[in-house]
Image: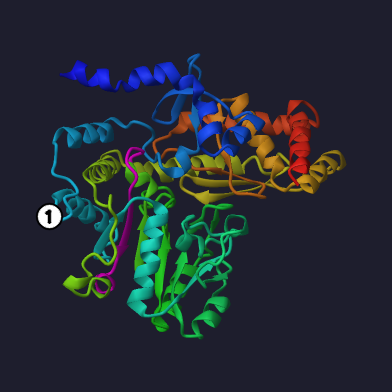
Amino acid sequence: MKDERREGFDLTRLLEERGAERYELHTRHLNHQLPRMLRTIGFDKVYERAEGAHFWDAEGNDYLDMLAGFGVMGLGRHHPVVRQAIHDVLDASLADLTRFDCQPLPGLLAEKLLAHSPHLDRVFFGNSGTEAVETALKFARYATGRPRILYCTHAFHGLTTGSLSVNGEKGFRDGFAPLLPDTAIELGDLDALRRELKRGDVAGLVVEPIQGKGVHAAPPGFLRAAQELLHRHKALLIADEVQTGLGRTGDFYAYQHEEGVEPDLLCVAKALSGGYVPVGATLGKDWIFKRVYSSMDRVLVHSASFGSNAQAMAAGLAVLAVMEQEETVANARRTGDLLRERLSALVGRYELLHEVRGRGLMIGIEFGRPSSLKLRSRWTMLQAARKGLFAQMVVVPLLQKHRILTQVSGDHLEVIKLIPPLIIGEAEVDRFVTAFTAVMDDAHSGGGLMWDFGRTLVKQAVANR
């Protein structure tokens, strides 16, 4: 029987026969700019397999992953417990997504999630981070009867239309108007929050406790003070923990770093998937859910076709079990402190290195204008062409020379963001710091391949204007 099925579709054979066409297939049928971008910066690698915090290419070279799929791979790739849970749920042949029953797995996962936020009562399961945010926006508007959401400049909450309306990055919003009539304030600006709340039409404030773009944390005391202001004006605090949640910052949720903060709505996703099945969750207070689902007529007023599917729920339950058994949150705190301390010690050594910041294993490395004349002239050349090119100059040799995958933290930013799998330890810290030191040594030598690549980036930036 098994062989007969494979005659109809053999995934292994398909990949063997056509896997080498990967970049051409993307160019022809998907986002054609992606392979173009990867080739331009030398990121057009071919990875054959992955496990934990590492990839391997066809030659057997290993690459250290300090990106974790934009935070999705919190437990690394192919964790055996999560992988087995996926096998088990498939083998169980459950009567999934009948739409007219109540399966046990969603309730069990909701129970586990809510145990980490005991002030919250109910969960809606969707399929992604942006969908979790969309749910929170809808619930906040309906529960308060008000139309406007406040958000912070430089925020990233997703790219679907509602989430895009509270996205603080102009580059993502351009050309997609009209969006919802929401309003931006600066992260930490209580006066601006107070001013907007006085207008009486604000449903809530959505905020990342640590912004992914640039790795900027909310100032100490801001979330607590914002919560008090919002509640005084009968508005809601919405915490977007899509990237910062599930241990990333050294607490289960990033808002928990500040005593007394209890969001009314909470968005999670990414790492909850185990890297296998997309999942998003919006946690909220009982009264909010009961207002949205106020009668049997409204039972499906907000739903998702694939929400609460068995595979996603099984992955989420396995992830939370592993996090507890392996003490992942404590490891993120301990290893993050070590990595941040090692990198911070380099700030005084390199004039191009401006600041190291973050919490847990969410770390931003910011570069800035050097003091010496020779380096300053080269820095100015890069800035004139396009801000962010120096950070890209660091990311590229980290991959090409040292086989470490990282990312620039945002467009037009001289910041590298490190969000590795939460399972890394001292060996990975040593490898990254050694490689980063070598790249900084090269950058400060004033010559070599790194600055040659910088000139290539300048030409590309000028050509794209």
Residue 84: which quarter of the image? Answer: top left
Chain part drawn in magenta: 274-289
Task: Determine which residue is flagged by label 1.
Answer: 101
**Residue 313 colored in magenta in the image:** no
Residue 121 image point, x, y percent: 24, 65
Above-or-below relation of 160 to 18: below
**The quadrant where residue 224 appears:** bottom left
- In this picture, is 464 found above or below 5? below
Q: Amino acid at mark 1?
A: Asp
Residue farthest along the top direction in this orientation:
59
Q: How is the image coloured?
A: rainbow
Residue at 82%, 43% (x, y): give it.
Answer: 381
Residue at the image position 60 percent from the left and 59 percent from the top: 175
From the viewer's side, name the closer residue of 455 and 323: 455
Coordinates of residue 380 in the picture (x, y in percent): 82, 46
Relative image position of residue 211 (x, y in whole percent):
52, 56
Residue 262 visible at all: no
- Position of 463 compared to 117: left or right? right
